Amino acid sequence: MSEIRVGLIGAGSIAQVAHIPNLKNLGVPIVAVADAVEERAKQIAQQHGIPHAYGDYRQLLKRDDVDAVIVSTPTSTHYPIVTAALKSGKHVLCEKPPAMNDREAEKMAELAEQQKLVLMYALQMRYRNDARAVKKLVEQGEFGEVYFGRALYIRRRGAPGGWFSRKELSGGGPLLDIGVHVIDLTWWLMGKPKPVSAAGFTFQKIGAKGLRLDRGWQPADVREKLEQEVVYDVEDYAGGFIRFENGAVLLFEVSWQINDKDRWGSTICGTKAGASLPPLELYTEVLGEQATVNLRVDEGNAYLEEIREFITCVKEGRKPLTDAYDGVTVMKMLTALYRSAEQGREVPIK
């Protein structure tokens, strides 16, 4: 792993909690870190022994000793930063959601292909051990025809605040933040069928009055008390369904704030069997009788496996499990769901 040298663009919460520790676990050298808050970049560099720190990501991209970058910045910056990184010859692992909309995602994927560089998105739920176990069973035909999926991620009170709840920076609320994970996971388990239409609806009934900045996931600006004003102009809740060309349907619900029980999960149903996680259960027949089988597979460290996949793909020049064009399709689904919610009708996905 040590042959690939990495730069970090964005030194906030996800970089500190997930990317830096797992790069270290794999022995991948971190050459430089950049953050719009230069003092944060310097502090993280000092804390983790990273040689160089910048307040401008463009300075990092000028370095010849950086082979690849991990982009962990607000969604509105993904397109300009990823585009600049690819043009400078760097491979890219970009945090989710891929972009503000499907058009940006498509342009980034096309550029990565032209540059012959790896562009991978941090949809790490595909790297869970339990998810991979289900995927293997699907590919072996154990479920028969998979025709239905359900994606669920409900937080009773779990809005992160900061840039996450500012639409101009995030592009949307829980649908783009946590919905992207479970919708992508379920779609992948279903075999990645081609989406043809979507119907979605959203609510903002609790909004800023239910947001507390002293609990839950906190972006770095909130945690460091650089941003204390609450701006909340995104949805609390999103629900709906996606239809696929093969006739399958994916039903979903996601929320940051709702008076309901905290829970999350992914379910797929086929003509022969079904499964859900977590915990990983298989719904099938044993000796002609209905049975629920607990497969006892833990989640593992999805963040570690995500980093391992990225570095391996850069070294081997192969397409990653969460590749750029999967990111385009995911963004087409999410963009269509928002468009459907605005128009109050089912809309096509092209």
Image: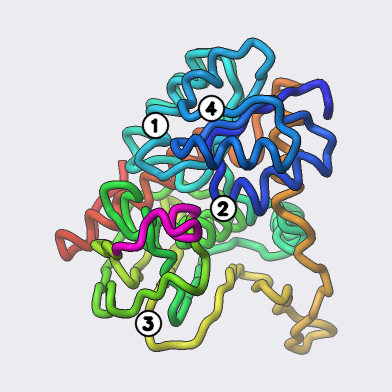
Residue 325: x %, y % from top left: 50, 34
- Residue 242 appears in the figure: no
Mark 3 / mark 1, whichever is N-terminal: 1
Report which residue position mark 2 lands on. Answer: 13
How crowded is the residue under tag 3: few (<14 C-alpha within 10 Å), some, or many (20+)? many
18 versus 117 height, above or below: below
Mark whose residue sits in front, 4 or 1:
4
Mark 3 / mark 4, whichever is N-terminal: 4
Between 167 and 231, the one lying in front of the other is 231
Q: Amino acid at mark 4?
A: Tyr
Residue 246: x %, y % from top left: 46, 53
Report which residue position mark 4 lands on. Answer: 54
Q: Amino acid at mark 1?
A: Tyr
How crowded is the residue under tag 4: few (<14 C-alpha within 10 Å), some, or many (20+)? many
Q: Amino acid at mark 2?
A: Ser
334 versus 203 height, above or below: above
Q: Is residue 211 left or right of residue 312?
A: left
Q: Residue at x 50, y 72 (%)?
A: 152
Quadrant in the picture for residue 117: top right
Q: Is residue 291 left or right of residue 107?
A: right
Report which residue position mark 3 lands on. Answer: 258
Marks 4 and 2, how far apart at CA: 17 Å
Marks 3 and 2, how far apart at CA: 24 Å
Mark whose residue sits in front, 4 or 2:
4
Q: Secondary structure at mark 3?
A: loop
Q: Secondary structure at mark 2?
A: helix
Q: Tell me whether the residue at label 3 lies in contact with that at label 4, contact meaning CB atoms closer than 8 angstroms.
A: no
